[in-house]
Each structure stands twice: as C-alpha cells, then as structure tokens.
Amino acid sequence: MPSNYTGACKPGSFKAFAGNTKCSKCPPHSSSHDQAATVCHCDKSFFRALKDPSTMACTRPPSAPRNVVSLINDTALFLQWMPPRDSGDRKDLTYNVLCQRCDTADSGLTQCEPCEPDLRFIPKALGLTGTSVAILEYAVHANYTFHVEALNGVSGLGVAARSLANITVNTHQAGPALVGVVRKDWATENSIALSWEQVEQPPADIVDYEVKYYEREQEQLSYSSTRTRTASVVVTGLRPSTVYVFHVRTRTTAGFTAYSPNFEFSTAAEDPDVADQGQVLVMVTASVGGFSLLVILTLFLLITGRCQGYIKARMKSEEKRRTRFHSGHVPFSGIKTYVDPDTYEDPTQAVEEFAKEIDPSYICIERVIGAGEFGEVCSGRLRLPGRMDVPVAIKTLKGGYSEQQRRDFLREASIMGQFCCTNIIRLEGVVTNSRPVMIVVEYMENGALDSFLRSRDGQFTVLQLVDMLRGITVGMTYLSDMGYVHRDLAARNILVDKNLVCKVSDFGMSRVLEDDSEAAYTATGGKIPIRWTAPEAIAYGKFSSASDVWSYGIVMWEVMSYGERPYWEMSNQDVILSIEEGYRLPAPMGCPVTLHQLMLHCWQKEAGQRPNFTDVLSFLDKLIINPGSLLTLANDAQSLTDSPEDLPDYPLFISIGDWLDSIKMSQYKNNFLAAGYTTLDSISTMNTDDIRRIGICLIGHQRRIISSIQSLRLQLHHIQQNGFQV
Ligand code: ADE
C-alpha cells in the first residue's frame, strides 16, 4: 500500500525521525515556523528539560510558593507553605529553603549573612517534596529570613527571577530566661513569698510572670502554676514542712521566655498548738456529723482551688481559715480542684470568693459587639490605677432582672475566676455593687472560632489549624484536671485572640464533677446541644470529661472544615439515629487522615474507650513535631462508601440547579452539565479531584461543594437505613 506520510511536515507540525511516519502537531507552548521541522521550539518563557521528550509540551518554572507561615516553640521552628498557584504544568515540583540571619548593628544598619551551619533542617533544606520543614538549633534573639523557593525540571533554564516567598522570623519569644535568681522572702506553714529580678532587658513589654511549682518529692507528677503581674508572689495552699521546687518565666507581648533555673524552698514546720487545735476540730466535726465535714472539705477545696491573681483580697479569709485546716488530717493533693458555686448556700459568696470587684469608673465601654443571654456584650478598656490599659469584653446584665437571673449571670464569673490557664478566657473581675451588673473578661480580637473560621475559609495551613486545636486541648486538659465538665464545648464557645490563640469560654452550662471516678452529672431535662453531645449524655444525662472529649472531636471537625455545621442540615433526631447506627462524620476536605482518626477515637460509643485530654494533647504534639504525619489527606468524598458503585439507587427529589442554588453555587451549574454530571446520582460519586477537573478552582467553593456532596451521601445513607420519612 502506498505511504501517505512521505511529504515534508508543514509549519506548526514536526516529525522527529525521517521516514514513513505521520507529522505531529507541535505540542502545547511550542511551534515550528519552517517546513520539514524535526522539532518544535518552545515559545518564549517555556522550556524543555533535558529528559523531556520532543512530544511533550513545553513547560515553565513554577510561580512562588504561597502563604509561608511559621510556628515556634522552645525547641523547634516550623515553616509551612502552600504550593505555587502555577506549577508550570509539571509534576516534578520541589522546594529549597534558604536561610539568612539578619542582625541590626548599633549604627542601625541591618546586615544579612548565611545562617549558621549548625542549623538543622528536618527532613532537609533542599529538594523538599513536601510543603513544610522543621528547623532546630536556631539561635535565640535572632532574626532569620527564610526564602522558600519552588523549583521544577525547567527552573534555571530561562532568565526569569527565582520563584521565592520570604518570611522573617524572630526567635525572641523562645528567648532565654529573663528571670535570674528567685528569692524566698518569707514562709509560713502553708505559704511561701517569692520575689525576683530581671537579668536582662525584655525584648518586648512584660505582660506577667508565670510561677510553676511542685513538691520536690513528687518529681513533677503534678504541678501547679500561678500568674502575677509584679515580680513577686505569695504562693499559698502549700503543705507544712515540705520542700517545693519553683521556677518562673516571663510572658512578654512577644510570647513566653524560657524558665529560670529551679529554686527549692521549704514551708515552715507545723505549729503543734495549732495542729492539736485542728485535731480537736476534726473530732468535733466527726461528732457533729457528715454535713459539717462536707462543708469543711468544700471550704478546704476553696483554699486549694483558687487563682493567685487577687492575693490581697484573699489573704484575710485565708488567715481566718488557716487555724481550721491545719490538722493535716485532710489529704492535700496539690492539684487545684474546681468548686461548684451551687454548693454555696449563698452563691453571692462564691462570686466574692473568686471574682474581684471592679470599680465601674475604671471601665471604659467603647462599643456593643454582641448580645448575650442576659444582655449586651461590649468591648472596652479596663484602666486600673498604676496598670497598663487592658482591652476587655464586658458582659452586662440588662435591667429588670430577677434575683435568680442575677445569680445565674454571676455564676459564670465565679466559675471562670477559679481558672488560671493561657487557654481559658481570663476573668478580670465583676461589677456587682452598682448598675449595670457586669462581668469583665479579657478581649479576644477575633471573636468566636466558628464565625472566624467561616470568614477565613481555606486561609490557614493545616499546621496553623492544628495549633489552634492544641490550644483548645490545653484548656480542656486544665479543666478536666480540675474536675470541671464543660458540657457545651463547641467552636462557637471558643474565642480567638489576635495571635490566633484559642481559649475556652462560656461556662454557663457546667456542673461539678464530684471527686468520684464514677460521678457524672445527670441532666434532668434542659437544652442539650445535640450535635456536639456524646450519646450517653443525650440518652441519660451522663456528662463527664469523656463526654467533653466527644464534643472536642466535633470541634476538631468544625475546625478542619472551617466552621461547617456538623451533620449539615440533618435534623437532631436523624443525627441521634445515625450515631446510634454507628455513622460518624467523614473527614472534611483537606483533613489529614491522622486527625480524622483522632476524631473517630473521640467518638467511640463507649466513653471509657475514648482518649482523655492528656492523650489528645500528646498525640497532637507528636503530629506538630513531625509535620510529615499531616501530609496524607483523608480521601474526602470517598470515605462514606467503599466504592462509588456501592451507592444506593435513591429517589432524586431535587434537580442539580436546586441543589446548587441551595448552597449558593449556581454559577457552576454548567460546569457539572458540560462534564457529563447530569444527575445527583453521578454527582454524589465525585471527589475533590473531580470537582477541580470540571473547573471549580476556588478552594472555598470546592470545600462547600464537597461538603454538600458528603451531606447528600449521608442523607442517602440514612434514607437507605431508615426509609424516607417526611
Ligand atoms: N464575645 C464574647 N466574649 C468576647 C470576648 N472576650 N472578646 C471578644 N468578643 C467576645
């Protein structure tokens, strides 16, 4: 048969080898201008790598990586970034992390030079295929500038500028201890007064000091900590004749510095007279009966369970009690315990005990930022004499309240006032002696976590989201260690400050968890946030720290899905039934598989099989130290069924148009139809890659659509199990 392919190739086509083969059209981004071309030359700014075949499209270097962010702790600095918007149409993308250290001389000139050779990059600095790196052995008080460069097989072939994204990190926050020697000023049987001096000028304004202490013999099995704004503190609630280990660190506006060395001080020996008096008291108590003992125990817990912030106000009542509790017959664990304000005959006393009364003339209200259950929430400033202004949020109790409403309102303050933890909202004080009655707390610039995430959809790296979760875990670990059950843990009850630090708030719902491993509060009705609540708490009111862990799993899901509503639009009843059947929320789009596994662990049916908050914290820390563990993403839409073929046939009640309208994505209707997705059936099999392939590029839109597809699948699953209910 005669050959058809003997002619010379026309411009725009080429034939690599002479002979009886067809001319091929020039691959994308290349052209041939002459007849009989054996190769197509790349267009301007496009290239072929040495190993690229001539049939391959010409490609170009990638654009710069995006959103480089840093996280720093005492030992490691983490960088994470997002892939470039343009990969140059190649799959061989890698990254180099280049480092410079820039110091400012006394003359004011900043000089940069390559970083110290002993800086360690984990896994490596050059040729990274992932989008994160950990850096160890960095110097403190230094400014490092990191250049993250995106490269592919054709980088360096043209004259284009390198594709770099830069970030400057200062390591001040992990700086050395600013506190040198800690002195003991005086000690009694139950308290030690300490003071210290700065050894170095702080790199930023001092916010306060954290004093950590524990019994030497306990070797840090448990420790307590307290905060003070001045360079001295009186630590109370200690055991007589006991050696304590103390160390102090400074919190500046740039973060914590390192701890001072350890200092050991002993409390004074017990006064035998007082001890005898105590023994008599215990005997009398025993004869008066269990009720008195309960009161004494409660009061004892009060002493051990308070924050140090308002030392002066407390010292008087402390002194009053001291003689009553010096018997040494009541064991003291050193761990603070939460005291339920409801155990006070007069709850006003609990407020007096745990919350500082603020003179209203020190409060400057600036604007209304929301509406609470009891009245408006405002932002403003607290101007205590001799102190820096503090931005605050002020909850007000609206006029015309009943005595019961006033108590309920202030109950939250008497709970909050017992906590002292970076990840729990801090109570500044209350106004109860004048109108309006107010609760003043620290101001959190970014408001509630759920709405914050919704407004910043897709804008954080996984590591940043995990760091937010870590903060919540620290707060919840503290609460559960104190025996406090939150009962309403949800992203809407987490507040976020300007540095993205998350703090647990909203203590209205809680009840005491008594000092009994079996004891958990049983609800007698009342409103329960179904989607966040563990099945045993819904079914028979068994609230516990383990049920808080279930809610925490839901918060993890809210965070990783940027504030999506758990179980979407399903009714509460359907949620309860689905959970009972064993259904669990699928991994949100872009969620690492390790995090989804942790969520599933928190949602174990048996409360005893769930992790506790300490377990969750150590798990998250391991992930943060090894960010590679966050790289494998869960298989979004595929996770509900093993394969798309398993999907049930189900009635299609709505059209694609209606569905897209309902999620405000109707602009993409043609994308689905043009790609052949003409039924909701076929759409329900789509995953993120499919969504991307049909031209939906905005991450936020991809997320909303994938999330809605998951919701569709969930509802189908439910219909399949239960039949369709109108
Ligand atoms: N809304 C409620 N409490 C708040 C707080 N502490 N800071 C900012 N917004 C709030």
Image (cartoon, grey):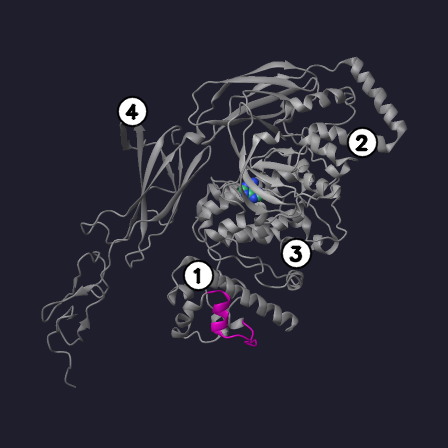
Q: Position of residue 542 (x, y in %)?
A: 73, 50
- Judging by the rendered image, the residue that carries numbered circle 4 is 105
Q: How far apart, in angstroms, are the residues tagged by discs 3 and 2?
A: 36 Å
Is 573 rendered above or below residue 285? below
- Judging by the rendered image, the residue that carries numbered circle 1 is 702
Residue 358 in magenta stretch: no
Q: Position of residue 539 (x, y in %)?
A: 73, 56
Of 207 and 111, nearer the camera is: 207
Of 228 and 460, nearer the camera is: 228
Q: How far apart, in angstroms, are the residues tagged by discs 2 and 1?
A: 58 Å
Q: Position of residue 610 (x, y in %)?
A: 64, 49
Please say whether residue 568 is visible from this viewpoint: yes
Q: Quadrant of the C terminus?
A: bottom right
Could you tell whether 146 is left or right of 257 in the image? left
User: How packed is label 4: few (under 14 Cα within 10 Å), some, or many (20 or more)?
Assistant: few
- Secondary structure category for the residue under label 4: loop
Callout 4 amino acid = Ala
Mark on residue 530? Answer: 3
- Judging by the rendered image, the residue that carries numbered circle 2 is 295
Which of the marked residues, 2 or 1, is nearer the chain's N terminus? Answer: 2
Callout 3 amino acid = Ile
User: How packed is label 2: few (under 14 Cα within 10 Å), some, or many (20 or more)?
Assistant: some
Callout 2 amino acid = Val
Could you tell whether 510 is left or right of 145 in the image? right
Q: Ligand 1 is in which quadrant of the figure?
A: top right
Could you tell whether 417 is left or right of 146 in the image? right
Q: How far apart, in angstroms, are the residues tagged by discs 3 and 1?
A: 28 Å
Magenta region: which residues?
647-664
Q: How far apart, in angstroms, are the residues tagged by discs 4 and 1?
A: 49 Å
> Is ligand 1 less than 8 Å from the beta carbon at label 3?
no
> Is ligand 1 less than 8 Å from the beta carbon at label 1?
no
